[in-house]
Amino acid sequence: MASQNIYILGIESSCDDTAAAILHNGKILSNVVATQEVHKQYGGVVPELASRAHQQNIVPVIHQAINQANIVKKDINAIAFTRGPGLMGSLLVGTSFAKSLSMGLGVPLIDVNHMQAHILAHFIEEDAFEKPEFPFIALTISGGHTQIVKVTDYFQMEVIGETTDDAVGEAFDKSAKILGLPYPGGPLIDKYAKNGNPKAFKFPKPKVPGLNFSFSGFKTAVLYFIQRETKNNPDFIKENLEDICASIQYSIVGILMDKLKKAVKETGINRIAIGGGVSANSGIRNALMEAENKYGWKCHIPKFEYTTDNAAMIAIAGHYKYLEKDFADLSITAQARYKF
Ligand code: KG4
Ligand code: ZN
C-alpha cells in the first residue's frame, strides 16, 4: 500500500460552504472553501439560496483545488463526496457533480458521511499533529450536530451521546442573535469572550440524563436574561458585551466538558478528539488542553482549517475507503438524515 500513489478529490456541499480538496497519500495538496456570504443578511442559512450558490461555486472551486494542487484531472484516482447528513438541496449539487465527474473520468466514486469525516480529519497527515490512537472518544460539535462518538476504527463508530434538540453551534448562534450579532455568531462570541469575565453572569446547566445534551433551554435562558436586563438598562448589551459572551461561552464549554468527563468514566477511554465547527472555539480548546494536565487525558485538537466545514476531511475519509475498495455506484442518492 505504501508504494501506492493515491490522489483523492474531496467534495463537500452539505450546508453553506462549497469546498473541494486534493489529498495525495493522506497529505493535503489543496483545500479550497467558498463560504456563502448571501445568508448573513437573513440571520441563518436559507436552503434554496444555499443550493443555488453551490451550483455557481462548485465548478470554480474544484478547478481551483486541482490547480492549486498542481495536478491534472487525469491524476485523480477517486472522487469522494458528502452524501449526508445536511440540507437536501445542497447535498444534491455535490452528489450529482461527483457522480458525473467520476463517470467522465472513469474513476471510482466514494460516498462519505459528513459527521464521520469531521472525526477522520484527525488522520490527515500533518507534521505537528499526532493522530489519535484507537479506541478514542470523539466530540463532534457543529451547527447541525452535537455527538459523543466511541471510535474503535476508521469506520467503526458508535454514537453514545447526542443532542435531543438544538446543536451546540445553534446555542452559540442563537445566543449571538439575541445579542444582535450577525450570523454565524459563534466565532463572534468567541472573539468578545476573550476580554470578558466568564463568571460575570451565570446560566443554568440543563439536566439531561446519560451522555445526551439539550441546548434549547439554554438559548431561552439567555433570551429571558437579556430581556430582563435590557428592561432595566437599554444599554445593557453594549455595556457588558464581553462579559456576556465570556459567560455564555464558559457555560457552554462547562456543559460539554461535564459530558466528556462522564463519557471517559463510562468507557474507560481517555483519548479525546474534537471536530466540527465549534471545535474552533478557544474556550473548548483551552478546556481540553487543561484536561490533559488535570485529568491525564490525551486530547487531539484539529488544525483550524479542518474544523469548520471543508473538503479535506471528506478526502481523507475517501482515502481510507479507497484503501478498502469501498466504492459507491451511480445509483447512490444524497441523504439529508444519514446515520452511521
Ligand atoms: O461544522 P460547521 O462548519 O458546519 C456544520 O456542519 O454545521 O459548524 C458551523 C458552526 C456554526 O454554528 C458556527 O457558529 C460554529 O460552528 N463556530 C463556532 C466557532 N467557529 C465556528 N462556535 C463557537 N466558537 C467558534 N470559534
Ligand atoms: Zn460540519
Image (cartoon, rainbow, N blue to C red):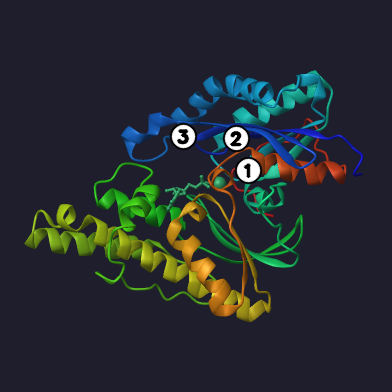
Residue 231, image x, y percentages: 9, 60
Kindly report the distance in space between the C-alpha atoms of the residues bearing marks 1 and 3: 15 Å
CB under 8 Å between discs 1 and 2: yes
Quadrant in which the N terminus appears: top right
Q: Give amino acid for label 2.
A: Leu
Please give the label number shown on residue 91.
2
Q: Marks 1 and 3: CB-CB under 8 Å?
A: no
Instruction: Determine whether the residue tagged by mark 3 lies in a helix, strand or loop.
Output: helix
Question: Vertically, is 202 above or below 282?
Answer: below
CA gap, disc 1 to disc 2? 7 Å
Marker disc for residue 47: 3
Residue 160: quarter of image: bottom right
What numbered label is drawn on residue 84?
Answer: 1
* Location of residue 209 with respect to 227 vertically, above or below: below
Tell me the residue at 50%/61% (across/down).
285
Position of residue 94 in the picture relative to residue 332 (left or right): left
- What is the C-alpha distance between the residues marked 2 and 3? 11 Å
Give whichever of 329, 190 is nearer the camera: 190
Q: Amino acid at mark 1?
A: Gly
Residue at screen point 73% across, 45% down: 317
